[in-house]
Image: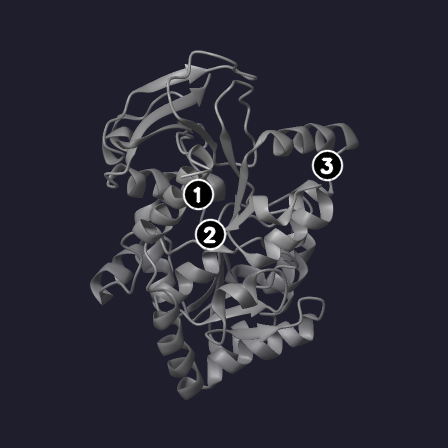
Amino acid sequence: MPLRLAFDASEALRPRPAGMGRYADELLGALSRNPGIELSLYRRRGNGPIPERLERWGSPLCRTFFHRQRGGVEADLWHGPANRLLYHGPLPAVLTLHDVAPQMGYARDRRRKLTREISRAAAIVTPSRHSARGIREYFPVPQERIRVIPLAPPAGCGPRPSEEVEEVCGRFGLRPKGYILHLGSRVPRKNPPAIFGAPRGLLEEFDLDLAVSGGPRPGEEELSVPLGDRVRYLGYLEAEEIPALYSGAAALLFPSFEEGYGLPAIEALACGCPAVLARAGALPEVAGDAASYCDPSSVEDVRRALRRVLEDPPYVESIRRLGFERTRRSWDDVAEDHLRVFNEVVNPFP
């Protein structure tokens, strides 16, 4: 019989899902194709079901649940895929904890609540060995309860045809191979001073723009003003636009101080976009030798790594080949690894 999985789909059902929501979306799509799983979805109030997404996940039943839900869940297992369980019932539970970095800054009472939720989980899934080490450092979790499951590029993420690249770039006033790309939030740990500071001088030298997702953030003006009109704010990006933007970029610039995984890194590699990454967090674990690395604490070193991918075509071709080799893993593989953990929790003594 298939394992009956109750899945908190709240993040995946947000109108504009971010990192955790994209993880949940891809995982749900792969789990829905796995004959070993029978899915039922739960959502917090305020996250209405979106028909096209439910259809992509095999049209499972989607119910509303409440904070600290205790009963009314007919399943073998509960999965909280977004750093929270929010379930206090009798079912065994698996919690995905993506990144310990945000938890470091939590107020004491919130960290205490998260510690209690972690203690209720029979297993903790996390996407990198780096993140697993952080979890053990900050929370009282035995090593045997932590399962590292690396992620994969989104389905359909790969080099796009030149016609598609030109069309998508045109929507944003960009020229193919005429911009450096940064995707993701620009909170302090993402290193905004390097995001805006490292391209300074290079944009004029190589006739490039700096394209960043979202809009201007408070306090960012003093960083962006020196770049003048070469900064392009892309706003919210639809999932289908992202592979073309990677494919058209001269480089991805991703100098974060801390990442539990770093989805933009694996996406860029899958699309053949040369990636400039910080030698920090999980990024070296994710990209291996397929990226140009830098010290994120030195804007000059970030600029050095960026310059290398802009002026050394043989080097770029070599890391592109390595990147394609590192991104063969699929979300079906990721789902199979999750199913293995779910079965271990439900049947600890087979």
Q: Is residue 258 left or right of residue 85?
A: right
Residue neighbourhood size for the residue with mark 1, other residues' Cα within 10 Å, grouped as few (<14), some (14–19), many (≥20): many
Residue 185 percent location from the top left of the image: 56, 48
- Pointer 1 or 3: first along the chain: 3
Sequence-first tag of 2 and 3: 3
How far apart marks 1 and 2 lie (CA) works out to 10 Å
Residue extending furthest toward the top: 72
Q: Which residue is mark 1?
A: 341
The residue drawn where x is 50% and y is 30% is 93
Q: Residues within 10 Å of mark 2 (few under 14, many from 20)?
A: some
Name the disc covering residue 106, or none: 3
Number of numbered discs present?
A: 3
- What distance separates the C-alpha of mark 2 from that of mark 3? 25 Å
Which class describes the residues within 10 Å of circle 3: few (<14), some (14-19), or many (20+)? few
> Dot 2 corresponds to which residue?
149
Q: Which amino acid does the dot numbered 1 rest on?
A: Val
Q: Which mark is residue 264?
A: none
Please tell me whether residue 301 is drawn above or below residue 230 in the rendered image: below
Which image quadrant is residue 115 in?
top right
Q: Nearer the viewer, mark 1 or mark 3?
A: 1
Task: Please state the horizontal and vertical placement of residue 297, each as a whole percent of the image.
Answer: 72, 67
Choose the circle earlier in sequence order: 1 or 2: 2
- Residue furthest right in the image: 108
**Helix or strand or loop: what does disc 3 sit on?**
loop
Q: Closer to the camera, 252 or 200?
A: 252
Q: Is residue 213 visible?
A: yes
Residue at figure coordinates x 51%, y 56% from the top left: 262
Decide if residue 250 is on the left or right side of residue 97: left
Q: Amino acid at mark 3?
A: Tyr
Q: Are marks 1 and 2 in contact (CB under 8 Å)?
A: yes
**Residue ID at (31%, 40%):** 31
Mark 2 vs mark 3: give the one in front.
2
